[in-house]
Image (spheres, rainbow, N blue to C red):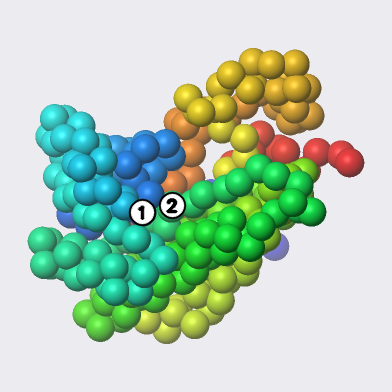
Amino acid sequence: MSVEPFGVQASGAQASRGFQASLDGRTVLVTGASRGLGAHFAQVLAASGARVAVAARKRADSEAVCETIRATGGSALAIALDVADRASARAAVAAVAAEWGRLDVLVNNAGITATMPLLDQDEASWDAIMDTNLKGAFLMGQAAARAMAADGKGGAIVNVASILGFRVAGQVAAYSASKAALVQLTRSMALEWARHQIRANALCPGYVETDINRDFFASEAGQALIRRIPTRRLGQLADLDGPLLFLCSDASAYVTGASVAVDGGHLVSSL
């Protein structure tokens, strides 16, 4: 049996498109985009040519990210959004369509957590985490998919999960449960919406260094955690750029229902 080199199609087959992750002309909505991963994602997508709707609870926070994007020649729209509210989710998708004609890509990034022993977890904090991390992804995904299906052009949904959807850590039970459920929800989205040419995949970061956790990872406990990562280093925001652009663009045109771990091998580390 002969094997064709990577990127070369067998005789008579459709010519290879090659690898391209451009988002020129695409419209993208990023939730939880006023800071952290979401703000970074919005700027990366804009730099790749996308028109980006920056959504967060407070429109003023979203506008600050939009100004950064516009300052580098990008196109951005600030949207106030409560992902756990159905009317707000639908209004956000409608706002993108009103501004740019349609929605091509949804990045479900909004998420919260609380660190506490499971014995001490109160119902309110459990519900808040589930409402944002899981219900919010469902409501936004449904609203986006309905719009994508209605115009017949399909689209892509990227749910930002976590390696804690596959492994567990102490004192973040609700977060881990929500991310495990989000991974399974992603698979359900992929199965049911493929007929509408809508792809759904999960991006699953490991431990990524940010302003919020930098002091912890400089501590003895943080350094001990880093030593358990096979690559012996924390992820950087830039480590997520390639996987994000891959899942949002036509480079992953035949990929749906996948969970892409970006974790330095943490998931495959020995127990």
- Can you say which quadrant of the picture contains the N terminus? bottom right
Query: In the displayed structure, would residue 47 be above or below residue 123?
Result: above
Q: Secondary structure at mark 2?
A: loop
Query: In the displayed structure, would residue 197 be above or below residue 81?
Result: below
Q: For the residue marked with disc 2, what is the amino acid?
A: Asn
Indicate the position of residue 53 as horizontal and vertical percent values. Answer: 23, 53
Q: Within the image, what quadrant is residue 147 found in?
A: bottom left
| Whether residue 14 is visible | no
> Residue at label 2?
109
Q: Are marks 1 and 2 in contact (CB under 8 Å)?
A: yes
- Residue sitting at x 70%, y 23%: 222
The local crowd at label 2, few if under 14, some if 14 to 19, many if 20 or more residues have their Cα within 10 Å, is many
Inter-mark Cα distance, 1 to 2: 5 Å
The local crowd at label 1, few if under 14, some if 14 to 19, many if 20 or more residues have their Cα within 10 Å, is many
Earlier residue among tags 1 and 2: 1
Q: Secondary structure at mark 1?
A: loop
> Residue at label 1?
31
- Residue sitting at x 39%, y 76%: 142
Total residue callouts: 2
Q: Nearer the viewer, residue 231 or 127?
A: 127
